[in-house]
Amino acid sequence: MKLLVRNLARNTTEEELRRLFAVHGILQSCAIVMDKETGESKGFAFIEMPKVGEAKAAIKTLNGMDVDGSKIRVKKAEEAVKKDDSEAE
């Protein structure tokens, strides 16, 4: 299950997020979204956890937790809607 973590402090690292989420299960991936121009964190990240039960436990426990002075928000990431190419014609 892909999770969206929002409201991250700009100094929060991927390693910190890995430690927080690993308590709840296996992490498939962890990526803080970075600004291409400045190289700084945009304040959100995506975490992938292969087991739905573990991901739900992480959401329940970590949503609203204070991390580096910011109250993080954790929820299931919405799937991006891909525009059908045939509609463009």
Image (cartoon, helix red, strand yellow):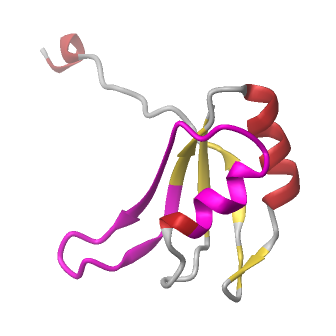
| Residue interval drawn in magenta | 16-45
- Report the number of discs: 0
Evaluate whether residue 68 shows in this view: yes
Q: Report the front residue among 84 and 49.
A: 49
Q: Where is residue 16 shown, x and y percent of the image?
A: 60, 69
Say above or below: 5 vs 28.
Answer: below
Residue 64, placed above or below residue 40: above
The residue at the point 59 percent across, 51 percent down is 4
**Residue 37, how many percent across, how many down?**
17, 77
Horizontal and vertical percent for residue 65?
81, 71
Q: Quadrant of residue 78?
A: top right
4 or 18: nearer the viewer: 18
Question: Taking 48 as reference, is 36 left or right?
Answer: left
Q: Is residue 73 above or below residue 28?
A: below
Is residue 46 left or right of 6 when viewed as pictured? left
Looking at the rendered image, the quarter that the C terminus falls into is: top left
Query: Residue 76 appears at what percent x and percent y?
Result: 67, 41
The reply to whether the magenta stretch includes residue 28 is yes
Q: Is residue 62 above or below residue 85?
A: below
Horizontal side of 71 relative to 34 (left or right) equals right
* Residue at x-position 50% and y-position 84%: 11
44 drawn magenta: yes
Looking at the image, the residue that sits furthest to the bottom is: 69
Query: Quick check: can you spot residue 74?
Result: no
Where the N terminus falls, by quadrant?
top right
Asked where in the image residue 80 lies, by quadrant, the reply is top left
Residue that sits furthest to the top in the current view:
86
Residue at 53% over, 36% down: 28
